[in-house]
Amino acid sequence: MRKLFLYTLYCVCIVMGFTSCDTNTPYYHYAHTPIDGWEKNDTLRYDVQPLKKGGEHKITVALRLNGAYPFRKLYLIMQQDIFPRLQSKTDTICFDVTSKEGRFTGNGISYYQYTVPVCQEHFMENDSIHITIRHAMKRDILPGISDIGVKLERIH
């Protein structure tokens, strides 16, 4: 009985090891914001280590919020600084958070998840990317936002 248990545990570990390694996603990280209010001057930072493989990459930004968020849309400004090329790029991202009727359109029950593909870039091997995100809303403090995530996926 003990051998069967150890064998099963060993198989589960092997399967998890193979499925947890995703070589096409070199970076996926969420940064937390204060749920009671994300201030306009609080910039979120994401540092992508030097890439092991170059090629086409897709950048996606993800958002988690709760019912305390007071607006229909959320506008974010994302800046990428690519090293060692010293290239910089800025994008404005718009999340449609609620429908016209005021219902949250994201996935979830008490927290809602949204994702928006931002851009597709060609990165070289050993490029590192420094990404900053801040909100571009007129209100200085935005309540209800819990996390902002950045995902970098290699597509070619």
Image (cartoon, helix red, strand yellow):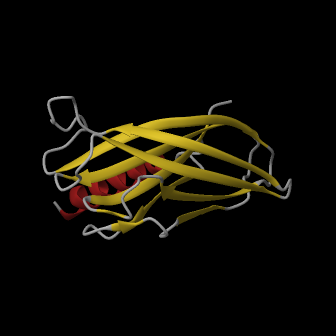
Please give the name of the residue rendered at 27% of the width and 40% of the height, measured from the top-left corner. Answer: 72
Q: Is residue 19 visible?
A: no
At 55% from the left and 42% from the top, the residue drawn is: 92
The quadrant of the picture occupied by the C terminus is top right
Residue in the image at 22% along x and 51% along y: 70
Marker count (numbered): 0
Residue 59: x, y in percent?
Answer: 57, 41
- Left or right, 99 with reference to 43: left
Is residue 146 something one can see in this rendering?
A: yes
Front-lying residue, 115 or 143: 143
Task: Where is residue 83? Give x, y as percent.
Answer: 80, 58
Given the current orientation, which residue lies at the most extreme front position? 138
State which quarter of the image contains the N terminus: bottom left
Seen from the viewer's position, the closer of residues 76 and 150 is 76
Q: In this view, does 30 lie to the left or right of 128?
A: left
Left/right of residue 44 with respect to residue 106 in the rendered view = right
Q: Residue at x 58, y 60 (%)?
A: 132
Percent across and percent down for residue 106 are 25, 38
Residue 150 screen position, x and y as percent: 50, 51
